[in-house]
Image (cartoon, grey):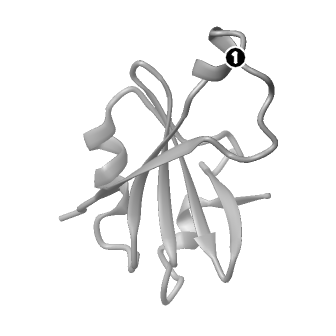
């Protein structure tokens, strides 16, 4: 599911903002609202992406966000021939947004 960035500005509260680290310098944004994780899009319904973490954090300034994290999912298990995990191997690092 997705939500437009402009819709975030009118929400009273966003439970969690997740900046996904997809590659060495590619970031994508999702938000958790009432337990549902939604990926954030622009006005043309394209996923919001950035090559700069600070730029992604700046998008969250002025929004009412309870918690902001940087999330990275590791492909390490796959790279070293480990068995496929049934659980999530995501790492989340708390971030502060000014």
> Element type at marker 1?
helix
> Which of 54/10 is in front?
54
Sort mark 1 into few (<14), some (14-19) or many (20+) by Cα contacts within 10 Å: few
Q: Which residue is mark 1?
A: 78
Question: Horizontal placement of 49 versus 43: left or right?
Answer: left
Q: Quadrant of residue 48?
A: top right
Q: Quadrant of the N terminus?
A: bottom right
> Which of 71/40 is in front?
71
Residue with the most extreme top position: 80
- In the rendered image, the vertical position of residue 63 relative to residue 34, given as above or below: above
Residue shown at 51%/82% (left/top)? 10
> Which of 26/63 is in front?
26
Residue shown at 53%/71% (left/top)? 8
Question: Where does residue 21 sit, x and y in percent of width and height?
Answer: 47, 34
Residue shown at 51%/78% (left/top)? 15
Question: Where does residue 89 sit, x and y in percent of width and height?
Answer: 61, 41
Residue with the most extreme front position: 82
Q: Quadrant of the C terminus?
A: bottom left
- In the rendered image, the vertical position of residue 86 relative to residue 22, given as above or below: below
> Which of 59/27 is in front?
27
């Amino acid at each position: 599911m997705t939500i437009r960035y402009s819709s975030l500005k009118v929400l009273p509260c966003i439970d969690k903002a997740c900046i996904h680290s997809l590659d060495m310098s590619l970031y994508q944004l999702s938000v958790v609202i009432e337990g549902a994780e939604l990926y954030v899009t622009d006005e043309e319904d394209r996923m919001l992406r950035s090559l700069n973490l600070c730029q992604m954090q700046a998008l969250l300034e002025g929004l009412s966000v309870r918690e902001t994290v940087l999330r990275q999912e590791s492909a390490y298990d796959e790279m070293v021939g480990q068995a496929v995990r049934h659980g999530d191997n995501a790492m989340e690092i708390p971030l502060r947004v000014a």
